[in-house]
Image (cartoon, rainbow, N blue to C red):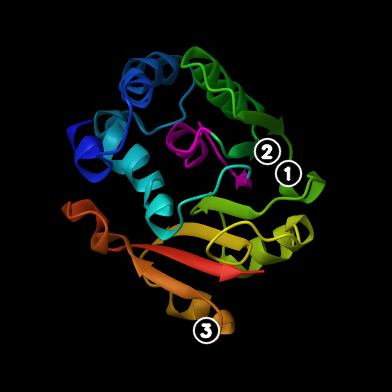
Amino acid sequence: MESLKRYFPELNQTQIDQFTALDALYRDWNAKINVISRKDIDNLYQHHVLHSLAIAKVLSFQPGTKVVDVGTGGGFPGIPLAILFPETYFHLVDSIGKKVRVAHEIADAIGLKNCSFQHARMEDVKGKYDFVVSRAVMPLSDLVKLVKKNIAKEQKNALPNGLICLKGGELEAEVFPYRKVATLYAVSDFFTEEYFTTKKAVYLPL
């Protein structure tokens, strides 16, 4: 939690309280429904919350922006981003119903008003969004095919509408078809912890 305050010193007390509450809530839900690896729950803030917020270092969403989180699992990156950007609307989608339920319950417990949830495959999601976010759900080319239909035309932000996804490891082959338009960010440029050494954020206008 201290690292969150260090990297995001502008957090207000409501946001600090919401982020702080996540630890007990995820531990409680994880004991019932496994949404985070049991051995990883002690690393919730660094491996899940802070990692999700790397997207905020790529782009600070403007009020009124609509974002869809594909394959949200237990609510990452959607819930941390929704806390950080209370005037941005987030729609969290996952094909596994029990994971969507956990994300929904946690969002309700901390009083998030800017989230909605859908148990569905992304190909069945009809709405239009300014940005798609995701955390290592599938290869980039597959994700692009799924979400192109959901990108709104009207622009509100400093970057053109598109996709921002978090990935690890070697990405050269995956990004190669989009090399002329994609931007890769090293998450270690945002956060100094060793965990982020191999982590990347990929931005792709669509």
Sort mark 3 into few (<14), some (14-19) or many (20+) by Cα contacts within 10 Å: few
Would residue 14 appear left or right of 93 to someone viewing this image?
left
Residue 39 percent location from the top left of the image: 28, 32
The Cα atoms of the two marked residues, 3 and 2, are separated by 30 Å
- Image height of 126 relative to 92, above or below: below
Residue 147 shown in magenta: no
What is the total number of numbered labels drawn onto the structure image? 3
Front position among marks 3 and 2: 3
Residue 70 shown in magenta: yes
Q: Which label sits on residue 95? A: 2
* Residue appearing at x 41%, y 45% in the figure: 52
The residue singled out by tag 1 in the image is: 121
The Cα atoms of the two marked residues, 2 and 1, are separated by 5 Å
Q: Nearer the viewer, residue 128 or 184?
A: 128
- Image height of 37 relative to 104, above or below: below
Which callout, 3 or 1, points at the residue further toward the start of the chain? 1
The residue singled out by tag 3 in the image is: 179
Identified by mark 1, the residue type is Arg
Q: Nearer the viewer, residue 147 or 158?
A: 158
Identified by mark 2, the residue type is Ser
Sort mark 1 into few (<14), some (14-19) or many (20+) by Cα contacts within 10 Å: some
Front position among marks 3 and 1: 3
* Residue appearing at x 28%, y 63% in the figure: 198
Cβ atoms under marks 3 and 1 closer than 8 Å: no
Span colored in magenta: 65-86
- Disc 2 is placed on an element classified as loop
Would residue 179 appear left or right of 116 to someone viewing this image?
left
Residue 87 percent location from the top left of the image: 55, 35
Cβ atoms under marks 2 and 1 closer than 8 Å: yes
